Amino acid sequence: MTVHIIQDFVPYNESVIWDITEKYYKENGIDVFSKMEAEDIVPYESTSNYQSAKAYLEMLIANSKDLPEESFPLKLLDCGAGNGYFAYNLLHCAKEMNFLEKIYLIVTDFAKENLLGMKRKKILKGFEEFKNYELVELDVSNLASAKTLEGEPYKFENIHAVSMNYLLDLLPLTILTKKNSMFKEKFDQLYLKTYIESKEDPNDMDFKTYCKALKHDLDWRPYKIDTESDFEKKYYDFFLNFHEKNKTIVGRQLFFTYFSFLSIDSLMQVISDGGFLYIADIPPRKYEIFKSFGGSISHEIDVDVLAAFAKDILGYDSVGLVDDILSRIIISKSKTITPELTDAFSKVFVENNMVNRLADIRLALGSFHHKEASDIFLPLLDEFEKLAGPSAEVSLRRGYYYRVNGDFKKAKEHYEKAKKLDFINDYDVDAILWKLNHEQKGPELTVF
Ligand SMILES: C[S@@+](CC[C@H](N)C(=O)[O-])C[C@H]1O[C@@H](n2cnc3c(N)ncnc32)[C@H](O)[C@@H]1O
């Protein structure tokens, strides 16, 4: 085994992992979200589901109920849209809630390949491009870079609401740890060394194998803000004051998310007064500084820092909540957030969080394998169907239910239905159908 150094120790934010992350998304498009295409998928189910979209719409409806008629359709911007499943659920849900005519969704991602994938796979079928939605290439840290699929510059104006699901967690940042106050430099910063241990030359590896083989060593070295980038310098005082004010303990890892600040700052500028920015992202993790999915890197998001940034630097009010699945925050484009918006946030995420209900039912259904438990699982399946909206997963689980109970005809009908909605090839429905046709005696215990 030879150790191939890809990059010796550099500050975390200068590491090659950022180029790799960008390449991973831009080259693989929506395949990174598919269990059949990627070995280590980028998760999307916690954010891009029907109940998350419904919660977002309920907040939007509450927030826009006093707007004059000419304000509609409201322009909504989804940043880092991934496989488009949040947009898909949002449009379906808006139709269901009789709100489709009231919105116009701008679906964006910095990976053009994602947007083309959404078109190729007809994910937004049933909705009209340029009437209900449009697709725009956008790097969220540089709004001026936005362009249409034809490469024409695109300008954002009068946006009413912005959604960012699992996006801030992968924007460049510096990872720091607080030193004792007697030191002149207040923080140490994380350095990363990147290498591959292999008999094979990394240059001969395909990209997927290369990403999988990457290993890192960590080191902490003094952080000198004077020598850092202008972006870091711009937000450093805020970051330092926040941690001094909050008496952050010495030795704790801190995430200086200056690219998130930059992105939030510029997005708030294109949101109309009274509109809002909705962020859902990774909650604090106890044991990991960072985590990779395939070739992409991700970090926890601290909504308290974001709320303080919105208030102290931008002058906007916010409401946020962290649970075991997500960190969530709404930043309102107003000095004081309206009671309508806070009440709606509280209703959908505190009082009756249907996203959590959906997640738990999904988890429970995953443990159903025997017909003897059918009477327990059938009501759960019915409830799942009510909550999950139009999705391949509902038909797939229904198909599995009939398969376990030996009704192959009905199972097949549901699997055929699932195949039509499995836009990203998340489940190998063809293989399941093939097996079903060959099952003679009884069902095989295949867990999907
Ligand atoms: C983890 S996925 C989240 C997808 C989706 N929002 C969800 O929650 O299911 C992150 C997405 O952000 C995109 N992305 C990464 N960096 C970006 C940037 N600087 N600007 C815009 N999109 C970016 C990636 O291409 C990817 O589609």
Image (cartoon, rainbow, N blue to C red):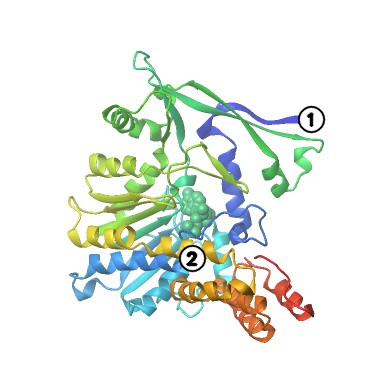
* SS of the residue under disc 2: helix
Question: Is residue 351 or residue 79 the one in the foreground?
Answer: 351
Q: Kindly give the residue lying farthest to the bottom in the view shown.
A: 409
Q: Give the residue type at disc 2.
A: Ile
Compared across the picture, whether 217 is left or right of 137 comes to right
Residue 396 at x, y percent in the picture: 60, 74
Q: Is residue 68 left or right of residue 301?
A: left
Residue on which the image places disc 1: 2
Q: Position of residue 354 (x, y in %)?
A: 39, 65
Q: Badges 1 and 2: C-beta atoms under 8 Å apart?
A: no
Q: Residue at x 54, y 72 (%)?
A: 377
Q: Quadrant of the N terminus?
A: top right
Circle 1 crowding by C-alpha within 10 Å: few under 14, some 14–19, many from 20: few
Would residue 156 be seen by someone viewing this image from the given angle? Answer: no
Q: Is residue 193 visible?
A: yes
In the rendered structure, find residue 361 and report the number of the disc placed on it: 2
The residue sitting at 44% across, 72% down in the picture is 387
Q: Secondary structure at mark 1?
A: strand
Relative placement, left or right, of 319 versus 441 is: left
Label 1 vs label 2, nearer the camera: 2
Identify residue type, mark 1. Answer: Thr
Image location (x, y in percent) of residue 15: 57, 34
Q: Is residue 27 left or right of residue 204?
A: left
Which label is found at residue 61? none
Q: What's the distance in space between the residues labelled 1 and 2, CA to CA?
A: 47 Å
Q: Which quadrant does the C terminus fall into? A: bottom right
The answer to which image quadrant residue 196 occupies is top right
* Residue 413 drawn above or below residue 318: below
